[in-house]
Amino acid sequence: MEPSQLAGKQPDRELKVREFARSEVFARTFRDGMELVDKTASYLDGDGREDAKALGRRESLAYASASMRVTTHLMQLASWLLVVRAVREGDMEIEAASEAKYRLPACNAASQEINLDGLPEALLSLIADAEGLYERLARIDADLFAERSAILAEVHDAAAQIRSLREAFGEG
């Protein structure tokens, strides 16, 4: 795809992102996400400390790993939500928000191999809520931004190949 074709697709992509950022769905998702961050932080700093003290050695290690994982996921989610809110409020351009550093990374399967047996129900509930929200936002992220990222990579790759050909034939 040539850069001129990218320019033709860009307004559609920008409209889609702007419509989502201004939607009630985003507003509700933002509230839910931030509430989950607060709820998790409150649990881990309060009742979770007491729950963790009552665990055996194996469960304590699993608790530490699980709480670190859920905290990481929630920080990634909060960052993503704040980027979309910045787009909505005009504080960030869609082009900047489309950069790879703002995408939600795929869940690492190795990090999900924590044995959750014996962990407090409150932590398990927070983990389930965070994973559900993460999956939902990852789908939205892919829908809003993945195509643009792929197109930009394709344009970059094509331009690099054309430069290589020109250099090979002495035209560069």
Image: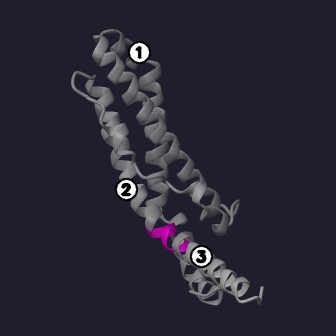
Location of mark 1 (residue): 49
Is residue 125 shown above or below 87? above
Q: Amino acid at mark 1?
A: Arg
Q: CA distance from mark 2 to mark 1?
A: 29 Å
The quadrant where residue 92 appears: bottom right
Lower position in the chain sequence, tag 3 or tag 1: 1
| SS label for mark 2 | helix
Majority SS type along the magenta span: helix
Asked if the stretch drawn in magenta spans residue 133, the answer is no
Location of mark 3 (residue): 157
Query: Which residue occupies the foreground of this view, 29 or 167?
Result: 167
Q: Residues within 10 Å of mark 1 (few under 14, many from 20)?
A: few
Mark identifier at residue 136 = 2
Which residue is at 65% across, 69% downward?
Answer: 95
Query: Which residue occupies the foreground of this view, 85 or 113?
Result: 113
Lower position in the chain sequence, tag 3 or tag 2: 2
| SS label for mark 1 | helix
Q: Residues within 10 Å of mark 2 (few under 14, many from 20)?
A: few
Q: Position of residue 48 (x, y in %)?
A: 38, 19
Asked if the residue at tag 1 contacts the one at tag 2, i.e. Cβ–Cβ closer than 8 Å, the answer is: no
- The segment highlighted magenta reads 143-148
Looking at the image, is mark 3 or mark 1 nearer the viewer? 3
Lower position in the chain sequence, tag 2 or tag 1: 1
Q: Quadrant of the N terminus?
A: bottom right
Which residue is at 28% across, 11% downward?
Answer: 56
Is residue 136 shown above or below 61? below
Q: Position of residue 136 (x, y in %)?
A: 37, 56
Q: Amino acid at mark 2?
A: Arg
Q: Position of residue 82 (x, y in %)?
A: 59, 51
Task: Describe residue 149's horizontal placement relative to residue 114 as left or right.
Answer: right
Q: Quadrant of the C terminus?
A: bottom right
